[in-house]
Amino acid sequence: MTPRPDDQARTELRDLAAQASRHRDEEHDRVETEFWQTIDRLQGHYHGAQQDIADALDVKRNQILRQTKRYRNADTARPTER
C-alpha cells in the first residue's frame, strides 16, 4: 500500500494537476483556432464550399460563418472573392 501523503505532497500534486489543466486548455484553444482558420481558408476554394464543409462536418452553414469570424485574424483573412 502506498504511504499517506503529507501536506507538501498534496500541494505539489494539486499544483501539477492545475498546470496540466492549464496546458490542456491552452492547447485546446490553439488547436481550435488553427482548425477554424483552416476552415476559413477552405471555404474560399470555390462557390458553395461553405455548404460542402458544413455537410462534411455535420453542422449548419451559420455555425461555419460564426466560428470562422470568431477565430479569424488579420493575418488569415480571406482574400475578397471575385
Image: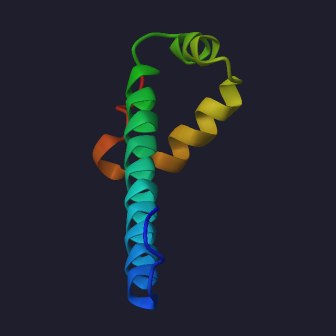
Q: Residue furthest bottom?
A: 7
User: Residue 56 in the image: x percent, y percent?
Assistant: 58, 11
Q: Residue furthest front?
A: 1
Identify which residue is drawn at 44% across, 10% down.
46
Q: Residue furthest left?
A: 75
User: Residue 58 in the image: x percent, y percent?
Assistant: 67, 17
Give the tally of numbered discs. 0
Q: Nearer the viewer, residue 38 or 28?
A: 28
Q: Is residue 8 above or below residue 28?
A: below
Q: Quadrant of the C terminus?
A: top left
On screen, residue 14 versus residue 12, left or right, reads right
Q: Is residue 8 above or below residue 13?
A: below
On screen, residue 50 versus residue 18, left or right, reads right
Identify which residue is drawn at 37% across, 51% down.
27
Q: Nearer the viewer, residue 31 or 59?
A: 31
Identify which residue is drawn at 39% across, 62% down.
20
* Residue 82 in view, yes or no: no
* Residue 6 in view, yes or no: yes
Q: Nearer the viewer, residue 57 or 74?
A: 57
On screen, residue 51 versus residue 47, left or right, reads right
Q: Nearer the viewer, residue 58 or 74?
A: 58
